[in-house]
Image: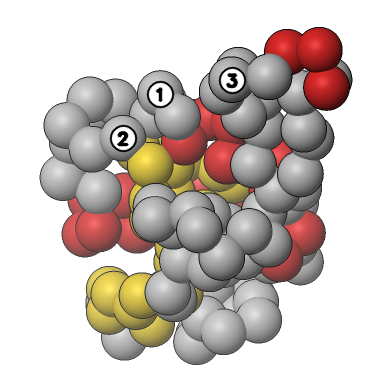
């Protein structure tokens, strides 16, 4: 936690650490894992942030999983977006077979979004 300098008494807190128990909104390390089944594949995902607007879906590299994203980055986006991270097929907590090509990964990502997101989507990836 970053505290304001002593001379700024009465100032509001500048930042809250991820491990702060006083936080009421979920953060990447605390959001529960959800699952959605699509065409015999069970996808694991995390969803938190600002609902009602664009969903920002984070796509990972070939065998990247939910835990690979930096919580400071994803929580920063969660202040303004509905943030969604997911494990692609065959990776970490998701079932199915790991896609062998980027084209297959894309098909899985689109199927996941169709089943789980239900709103307008922006994608971001590594």
Q: Residue at left 16%, top 45%?
A: 118
- Is 60 left or right of 53, judged from the image as shown? right
Left or right position of 32 against 116 = right
Q: Nearer the viewer, residue 92 or 89?
A: 92
Disc 1 target residue: 80
Quadrant of residue 53 within the rendered picture: top left
**Residues at discs 2 and 3 in contact (Cβ within 8 Å):** no
Determine which residue is flagged by label 3: 10
Residue 12 x, y percent position in the rendering: 56, 23
Residue 51 appears in which quarter of the rendering? top left
Mark 1 Cα within 10 Å, few/some/many (few <14, many 20+)? some
The alpha-carbon separation of the residues under discs 1 and 3 comes to 27 Å
- Mark 2 and mark 1 in contact (Cβ < 8 Å)? yes
Q: Quadrant of residue 63?
A: bottom right
Looking at the image, is mark 2 or mark 3 earlier in the sequence? Answer: 3
| Callout 2: SS | loop
Label of residue 50 in the image: 2
Q: Residue at x 39, y 52 (%)?
A: 25
- Disc 1 to disc 2, how far (Cα)? 6 Å
| Circle 3 SS class | loop
Considering only order in the chain, which callout, 2 or 1, is on the residue closer to the N terminus? 2
Q: CA distance from mark 2 to mark 3?
A: 28 Å
Quadrant location of the N terminus in the rendered image: top right
Label 3 neighbour load within 10 Å: few <14, some 14-19, many 20+: few
User: Which quarter shows the C terminus?
Assistant: top right
């Amino acid at each position: 936690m970053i505290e304001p300098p002593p001379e700024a008494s009465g100032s509001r807190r500048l930042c809250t650490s991820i491990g702060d128990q006083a936080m009421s909104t979920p953060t990447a390390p605390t959001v529960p894992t959800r699952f959605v089944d699509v065409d015999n594949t069970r996808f694991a995902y995390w969803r938190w942030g600002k609902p009602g607007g664009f969903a920002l879906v984070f796509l990972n590299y070939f065998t990247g999983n939910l835990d690979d994203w930096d919580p400071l980055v994803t929580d920063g986006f969660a202040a303004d977006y509905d943030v969604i991270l997911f494990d692609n097929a065959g990776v970490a907590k998701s079932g199915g077979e790991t896609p062998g090509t980027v084209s297959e990964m894309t098909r899985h990502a689109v199927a996941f979004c169709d089943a789980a997101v239900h709103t307008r989507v922006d994608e971001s990836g590594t």
